Structures are given as structure tokens and as C-alpha cells.
Amino acid sequence: MKASDLLVKCLEEEGIEYIFGVPGEENADFMMSLEKSTKIKFILTRHEQGAAFMAEIYGRLTGNPAGCLGTLGPGATNLITGVADSNMDHAPMLVLTGQGASTRLHKESHQVMDVVDMFSAVTKWATTIWHPENIPEIVRKAVRLARTEKPGAVLIELPEDIAKLPTEKSPLEVSKFRRSVPDPMIIDQTYERLKKAKTPVIIAGNGCIRRRASEQLRTLCEKTGIGVLTTFMAKGCVDMDEEYCLYTIGLGGRDIPAAAIEAADLIITIGFDMVEYHPKLWNDGNTTEVLHIDFLPCEIDENYSPQIEVVGDIAAGLKMLNDKIANEGGFDHDFSSQKAMREQMTAELEEHKDNAGEGPIRPQKALWDARQVLGDQDILLSDVGAHKMWIARHYHCHEPNTCLIPNGFCSMGFALPGAIAASLVYPERRILSICGDGGFLMNMQEMETAHRLQSNMTIMVWEDGGYGLIKWKQENEFERSTELQFSNPDWIQLATSFGWNGHHVTDASKLQETLEASFNETGPSLVVIPIDYRENPLLTKRLGELAANAQ
């Protein structure tokens, strides 16, 4: 067999189910080999960026990598935004690119560029296959690295002449390993420190959405009553209906949940990545003691100096702690301030649930209705824009990985292709993406992909005719904004032209029933609402008042 055949067989051995992408001349041999596979499904996309976002969401939902594919040159550069997004949000991914023949890579040549060097900054590992005999080792290493905590993206580049070479090699047997567990002596120290604390609080990060970690975190909270603040990435790691759920932190300004941190004498971070919510915003000057529980040692930062670091598998570490608590007794904690904070935030979330009438719809109302039509296991994906801030604050979850928000690289254009992948992974669930009109049009071409696949999903577009988040931030800092407005297409005609179902809702009282109807339609549906972003400066004012009252 030829090298491209072996590459496909190795990917099959690793359990790769999907490869999303746009082929080119230089990976034609690989595509011919892939066509023969009965185990891997290739999804043709309309842009490589969409392919990368699809692979990212597959990885986030399953914990296993999918492939995203592009050819050399512009095919590779088109992939890089979604790859960077996946890597910074710790989603496993395989990036597969073609390359010109190895005989012309040393000189100026058509579409040739150093793809491996370019991707080295946004992947865990990037390499070229220079000899077909190395393919089994490269694939085994790539998939293991992509899945290893903390997960991320890995690039494999295959030059077109190497793809044609003969080989008699076979795939390596897949072997998996158990992650290291924390030192029992550190668990003892953690337990003793928890006993001394009076008002501890947990900040749960991205690592807590792993199923086993979420289960052990919930057990810890049930045994101790300690409240949990989730980052944008950790939504659903504890059930929003539980008293110990203190909702979400991560907005730039001081919000109601910050009161739980300010009242704490011990902050326990679990699975927390610094990119999620910088410690300077919640522990400037290391004024409060921090206990760090994560797969890896903490990132070095002058405002993040944990006194205890519990390093190893999060679920295993929490189980060890839970077992010790069960054997040796509970604690004398005071959670009255956390309870008051939760009650205050709950009231704020419910404030606009009954809004009705024609005209722009408040963000709070749109998200209340979205929560009502989505079940515990259904999935909401957020694009990037002003709506992301509202989703982070007002949309909460019952289960992990049911609200997917880009947070590290934070790229617009994420939610439409992401919804296509989510519908492939969970065709039985309701999938809702919320986009601004700016972000939605960045990858609008994937509407054709969704129609071709008959993806059962709904995209809700919040229309304000501009880049609302940039305007919000400029006005906060400069009391004015630059030119940020644009025009939009006729949304219903757009939906119809792509074979989608289309809805335009201008009465808030009709939104919930329209969303419900969209999920009962066959194929993808577009729901467009005029959004009332007059609420943005009102929220800024509200956060400012909260900050002033805290001083």
C-alpha cells in the first residue's frame, strides 16, 4: 500500500470518526485513500475555518479528536483561526494539511510556505511526515498528545510525493494510560486547610466539565456545602438549581457573584485556566489564600500564588478528598453570604422573563426563553460578541458541556459550524446557537453544509446592525464609538435560498413559541430577533454601582 493508505489506517486504529475540510491538489492521494475507509466519514465544508470549528466542537463534546483538513498555503492559513481557538480552549484536534513535494520545499515555489513553523504557536505539536515508515509512530504520538491533559491541537503535514510512496508498515496498537493521581500527603494538607476555613468558595474552570470531575465536584459540594462559581467554560459542572451553585464569574466588571469571593477566606480553584478569568480581577495582590486543584501545576503569575497545589487527575484528587471527608467528618463553615448572593443573582436572572411587546427584545428575555425550551442535556453554543457577555451572565446549565463558549482565543464565526458538529455528535438533542449578525455572517457559507447534512439545529441571530461588543467597549472607555454599523441581508430570503426554515420575531411574547416550533422542524432553522442593546450601557451602569457599593 502507499503512505496515504497507511495514514488512513492509522487514523482508523485511533478511532477517528470524522474529518472535516476542503481538499486540494496536494492531498489528493490522501483523499483517495480516505474515500475507501468504512470507519471515517469525511464532511466537505465550504471553508477551512468552518472545518476547524467543527472539529473543535466534536473534540469538546466527546473528549476525542476529529480531523480538520486543508491543502497547503491558503488552505492551511484558513484553518489556523479555528485551530488556535481549539488549542486555547483545550479541545483535542488533529490538523491534517497537504504540502508540496519534498523536492521543492527548499526554494520559492507555488503556494509553498512553512506550515509547521506557522502552526507551532497554536498547537501542542506540529510535524511533517518525511518518510512513510514513520507514519504509525507519528499518528500514535499525535493522537496521544491531542488527548493528554490539557488537550489541544496537533498538526500532521504530508507532502504530496511522500503520500505516494510504498510502505509495508502497520498501525501501532493503541494503548491508553491512567493519569497520575495527587500525593495523599497533599490531600491531607488540603483537608486540614478546609477545616480551618470559615467561608471557602470554589472557582470551577474548564477542567471541571470532564464527566468524572463534575461528579466528584458535586459530591464535594453536597458533603461540605461549599459554593461554586463557574467560569464561562465550566457552566454545568454543577447543577444551576443547587443551592451551592453561585452562577458565573468572568465579566470584566465587578458583578454580584464577586461578593462570594470577597467574603471568602479561602479560594479553591479547580480545573482553572488563567485565561478564563485573570486572578488580578479577583485576587489582586494575593490578598486571599488560594488552593489549586488541577491536572497541572499552576501558571506563574504575580497575582496567583497558591499555598497548596493538588496536582494530578482532578476526579481522582476530589474523590480522595471526598473519601477523607466521609471518614473524618465535616466542617464548621458559614455560607450565609453565599446564600444571600445566590438569592440576589437569581432575582436578577428572573427580572425580565415576562417582558412582551413589539420592538427590540431584551437579551435577558431572549436567554430566559432559550433556557425554557432547552432540556437538561440540550446544547447552547455562543458565538463571540455582546451576546456572549449576556449568555455568560444569564444562561446557566444543569449538565457539563451543555453551554459551549469560546473563551481563550475567542474567535467570532464559531457557533454556526460548531452547531453542525454538535448535531452530528448528538442528533437526538436540541442544538441552539446564538450569534450576533456580525459573527453569523463570518461563516455564513456553512449554511449550505448544514442543509446538505440536514442538521437538526436552530441558529438564533441577535440583530443590531453593527459590531455591538466593540461599540459597547469603546463607549465605556471613550464615551463614543468609531464607525461600526453595517447592513444585513433579508434574513428570510437568506434562509430560503439555503434551504433553511426561517423566522423573524419582533414580539417578545412570540419568541418562546417560535423557538419551540423551530426545533420541531426538519433540518436547520434560522430565528432572527432585533436585540435591545440599549441594555448594554444599563448593565455597565449596574456593574459600576455594584463596584461602588463594595468599596
Image (cartoon, rainbow, N blue to C red):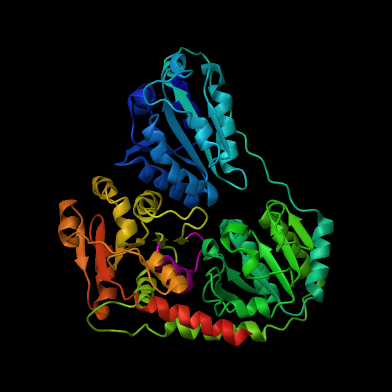
Q: Residue at x 45, y 32 (%)?
A: 96
Q: Residue at x 72, y 60 (%)?
A: 302
**Residue under the image location 43 percent in, 30 percent down:** 97
Q: Magenta span covers which residues? A: 385-401
Residue 345 drawn at (x, y percent)? 52, 82
Up the image or down, 361 lies above or below 36; here it is below
Residue 483, image x and y in percent? Answer: 32, 63
Give x and y (percent) for residue 477: 47, 71
As drawn, 244 above or below 13:
below
Task: Please state if 104 lies on the left or on the right of 486 as rendered.
Answer: right
Whether residue 456 is visible to the viewer of this picture, yes or no, is no
> Is 386 on the left-hand or right-hand side of 444?
right
Q: Looking at the picture, does residue 60 appear above or below residue 97?
A: below
Viewer-closest of 340 and 288: 288
The answer to whether residue 509 is seen in the rendering is yes
Q: Is 279 in front, or is 524? A: 279
User: Is 66 one of the magenta-colored residues?
Assistant: no
